[in-house]
Amino acid sequence: MKFFKSLYLTPRFFYALALLSLVFLVSFWQPKIYGIVWLMVLAFGLLLLMEASMLWSGKGLQGKRIVPEKFSNSDPNEVLVQLDNRYAFSINVGIIDELPVQFQKRDFFKSICIKGKQRQTFQYSVRPVERGEYHFGNLNCFVSSSIRLFRRRYVFDNEQLVKVYPSFIQMKKYDFLAIDNRLSLAGLKKIRRIGQTMEFEQIRDYVVGDDARNVNWKATAKLGALMVNQFQDEKMQPVYNIIDTSRVMKMPFKGLKLVDYAINAALAFSNVALKKNDKVGLLDFSHKVGNYLPASAKKTYLNNILDALYNTNTQFLDSDFGALQAFVKQRITHRSLLMLYTNFEHISSLNRQLPYLQAMAKKNVLVVVFFENTELRVLGDSKAESIPEIYDQTIAQQFQFDKKLMVRELQKRGIQTILTAPEDLTVNTINKYLEIKARGLL
């Protein structure tokens, strides 16, 4: 029974069978070749027996799939397949891998040739667009010899579970660029620091070249020597990522929802802020406040943030900015930088939330991050050639104008804003953070 379950006939088998049938038909009119036809049938049968004995002589193939412990959301992730040919002859292998259902890919097929007693590996990439658990199924391999009349199916029970986390590849990318001092390659700006910060560090002896305005006259009088105050850049400032997980963040761009763009940007931004020795916290909300992590400057705190972002779930209900404002007032008592990732499609929706945004901006530096609809921008910039296209273009331009009007309304009330395309969110968020730090607004 196992033999027949693993036996698959190839197209070459049916071609040979069709040829024999044709020759038999011709022999009806040419009886002289009738004997030759039976010799062909005998040769065909011997080839079948030969290939069957070659392929079913023990376990001639071993294979396994090697996947990382976790995948990075929205990024290409490599999967490795390793095959060991234990036959003494070369084989052709067709591989069908049972990918997780989230990829919706049912035509995966890879064909390779492996020489006798050798190992061969190949890799392919997958791009998840949703966080969560991804289940790989079996690895199916169909082996044939150079005769290629039969295929033997090998099924390797290689079921694996891989968790898809927010984009840690993107986080490492910006971390590397920051360390390597090549921020401009990723679109990050070097911003000139205005003035100086006034966080006191120590009193020390005056040396030639020190700013006379920093002379500490009380210490000078007491010690009888010229002493100056030494200051350092402000550190350990609290920074919070606040992610709106309501229905306005469900809109997809390039297969990825806005909420996942925000989650990926929050992770990369948190890593940069921790490198700058600031304290980083996290908060998400929709109809009520969900996950909350108080700000901390521990380097290992990034793991807590990563786990919290991975577990950020939403039913995409309406957001309650009033509940958010009350929570911020109660739990975030120190002046902090609040990066609020949300989205407004119409000026009226912004006006309803303005009182709550203004209340949060009174004691904190609030940055409202919302998204530009890139598809509407393309439509608005295209050339209209008919009356319906003119209508569509006019509506698209009106939506673009509303977005710019929202930016102006927020800036008039002293609220920092970022209007960005989804794919540029991470770069623009980090740029705004560096700008606020350079200007000493926090």
Image: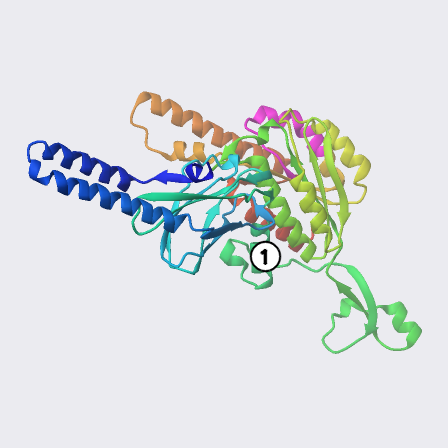
Determine whether, in the image, residue 109 is placed left or right of residue 234.
left
In this view, the residue farthest toward the right is: 222
Task: Residue at 75% x, 39% y: name it.
Answer: 292
Q: Secondary structure at mark 1?
A: loop
Task: Residue at 61% x, 28% y: name it.
Answer: 350
Q: Nearer the viewer, residue 301 or 360?
A: 301
Q: Is residue 250 above or below residue 164?
A: above
Percent across and percent down for residue 74 are 53, 43
Q: Is residue 137 above or below residue 53?
A: above
Say what amino acid the circle numbered 1 marks. Ile
Q: In the figure, residue 340 lies in which quadrant?
A: top right
Task: Residue at 54% x, 54% y: name it.
Answer: 188
Which residue corresponds to mark 1? 191
- Residue 109 seen in render: yes
Percent across and percent down for residue 40 are 19, 43
Percent across and percent down for residue 10 are 31, 40
